[in-house]
């Protein structure tokens, strides 16, 4: 891959690496305001085997004054982000079980006869579709990661290696018939072509079909200090208000929205054709009301959130700097896109000696942008460490359990968020 480096007009193999989102990705409005200033970052999951220069992109969040959508500033070319994506769902056992439960719940909600078609957009290795298959549905995956799509197909889950567009939806409808269920988990926040995706879903759904999706919930991102879940794979940060308006504009109807614990706070939405057979759940009006009461879309809420993040950074960095002044070795725990965002936002490069992670894919790599070396967590005992800064703070409890020996030998854990803790 040839990467040309000029600041604004960079290209990869002749196509632009990114563009600035100057219009709302949901409603096309140009009335965007800066909501959350965030540091520039290299692509958050680009942990490299050798330290090489990496392009940085803007990832501040902007708020649409018309529909309330919150979105990232730079939209990075998805070919760079996803075409060679190696993340495979089955590598996470918890997720597979989650999909089995999920498929059962969706099948019940859809009430579709066995043999009906289920389509998963962003189907990855086909884990979710295998669960639908085992219930007795016909399945079809769509995923642009060519190698992962090829493997899923070889394993019995037919997968189209492409992006989901209205054109592709028409082709699928001709070849496979309309769908009783369309799902999109994790990818619904990943596309800068959501209007086109919604039109494709409307095209593909049976009159009584349902579309279900899971997205991170904006209210959780603000209330639970989840700003580190902002990185370039996630373009939009959804609220019930913005989603409800969005589906209406595309001949669809949001009929249910439930808060679920996935990724520390997500929404599971259910959608049907406008005027479809199902009633709209009262929970939607309640959540929209609550978003109004908490002023989720008010600029002052975002200014206050910005101040809370700055305070959290100041407290965390003060403790780290004092430890370093006392000649303590500080190591960061975690090597993920969220950790990349946290390192950039809190200015931690130069304050930690190295990173450790339990995922073999991340071990013996260099972190995006700052090239901090990443080792297996056993390195804590070989290379030495006095303080572990748990940057993957959502996993603080299992990490501390796993490294009781470190604490027993006098080591300290520092957890930066949601509130500073020294254990
Ligand atoms: Zn908008």
Image (spheres, rainbow, N blue to C red):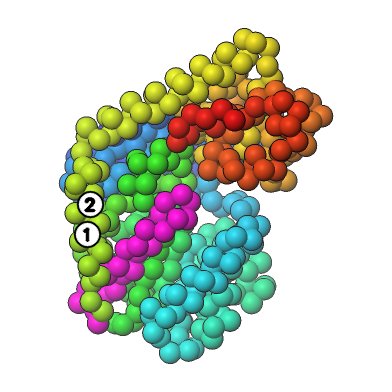
Q: Secondary structure at mark 1?
A: helix
Q: Is residue 397 above or below residue 313?
A: below
How crowded pointer 1 is (Cα within 10 Å; few <14, some 14-19, many 20+) is rated as: few
Q: Tell me where residue 116 sits by quadrant.
A: bottom left
Query: Magenta segment, principal secondary structure?
Result: strand
Q: Is the Cβ of the residue at disc 2 closer than 8 Å to that at disc 1?
A: yes
* Residue 117 showing in the rendered view: yes
Residue 43, numbered circle = none
Residue 286, numbered circle = 1
* Residue numbers of the magenta segment: 253-277
Residue 293, given in percent of the width and then of the height, sits at 19, 46
Residue drawn 50% across the image and 23% down it: 316
* Residue 49 showing in the rendered view: no
Residue 330, given in percent of the width and then of the height, sits at 65, 22
Q: Is ligand 1 less than 8 Å from the beta carbon at label 1?
A: no
* Foreground pick, 191 / 254: 254
Q: Secondary structure at mark 2?
A: helix
Residue 276, given in percent of the width and then of the height, sits at 24, 79
Q: Report the quarter where the C terminus lies.
A: top right
CA–CA distance in space, label 2 to label 1: 6 Å
* Foreground pick, 96 / 130: 96
Residue drawn 67% across the image and 43% down it: 401
Residue 290, numbered circle = 2
């Amino acid at each position: 891959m040839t990467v040309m480096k000029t600041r604004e007009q960079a290209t990869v193999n002749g196509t632009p690496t990114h563009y600035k989102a100057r219009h709302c990705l949901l409603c096309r409005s140009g009335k965007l305001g800066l909501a959350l200033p965030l540091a520039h970052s290299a692509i958050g999951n680009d942990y490299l085997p050798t330290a090489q220069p990496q392009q940085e992109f803007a990832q501040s969040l902007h708020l649409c004054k018309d529909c309330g959508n919150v979105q990232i500033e730079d939209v990075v070319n998805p070919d760079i982000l996803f075409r060679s994506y190696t993340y495979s769902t089955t590598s996470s056992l918890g997720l597979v079980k989650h999909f089995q439960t999920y498929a059962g719940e969706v099948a019940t909600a859809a009430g579709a006869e066995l043999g009906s078609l289920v389509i998963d957009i962003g189907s990855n290795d086909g884990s979710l579709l295998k669960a639908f298959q085992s219930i007795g549905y016909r399945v079809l995956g769509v995923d642009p990661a060519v190698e992962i799509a090829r493997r899923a197909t070889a394993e019995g889950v037919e997968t189209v290696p492409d992006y989901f567009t209205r054109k592709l939806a028409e082709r699928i409808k001709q070849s496979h018939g309309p769908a009783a269920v369309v799902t999109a988990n994790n990818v619904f926040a990943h596309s800068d072509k959501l209007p086109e995706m919604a039109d494709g879903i409307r095209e593909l759904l049976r009159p009584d079909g349902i579309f279900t999706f899971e997205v991170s919930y904006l209210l959780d991102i603000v209330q639970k200090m989840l700003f580190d879940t902002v990185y370039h794979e996630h373009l939009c940060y959804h609220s019930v208000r913005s989603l409800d308006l969005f589906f209406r504009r595309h001949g669809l109807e949001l009929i249910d929205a439930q808060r679920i614990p996935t990724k520390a706070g997500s929404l599971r939405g259910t959608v049907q054709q406008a005027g479809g057979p199902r009633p709209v759940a009262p929970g939607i009006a309640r959540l929209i009301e609550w978003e109004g009461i908490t002023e989720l879309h008010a600029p002052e809420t975002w200014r206050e959130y910005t101040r809370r993040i700055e305070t959290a950074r100041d407290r965390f960095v003060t403790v780290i700097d004092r430890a370093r002044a006392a000649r303590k070795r500080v190591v960061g725990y975690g090597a993920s896109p969220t950790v990349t965002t946290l390192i950039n936002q809190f200015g931690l490069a130069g304050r930690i000696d190295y990173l450790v992670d339990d995922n073999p894919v991340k071990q013996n790599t260099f972190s995006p942008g700052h090239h901090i070396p990443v080792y297996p967590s056993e390195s804590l005992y070989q290379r030495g460490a006095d303080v572990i800064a748990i940057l993957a703070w959502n996993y603080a409890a299992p990490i501390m359990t796993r490294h009781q020996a470190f604490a027993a030998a006098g080591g300290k854990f520092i957890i930066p968020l949601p509130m500073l803790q020294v254990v």
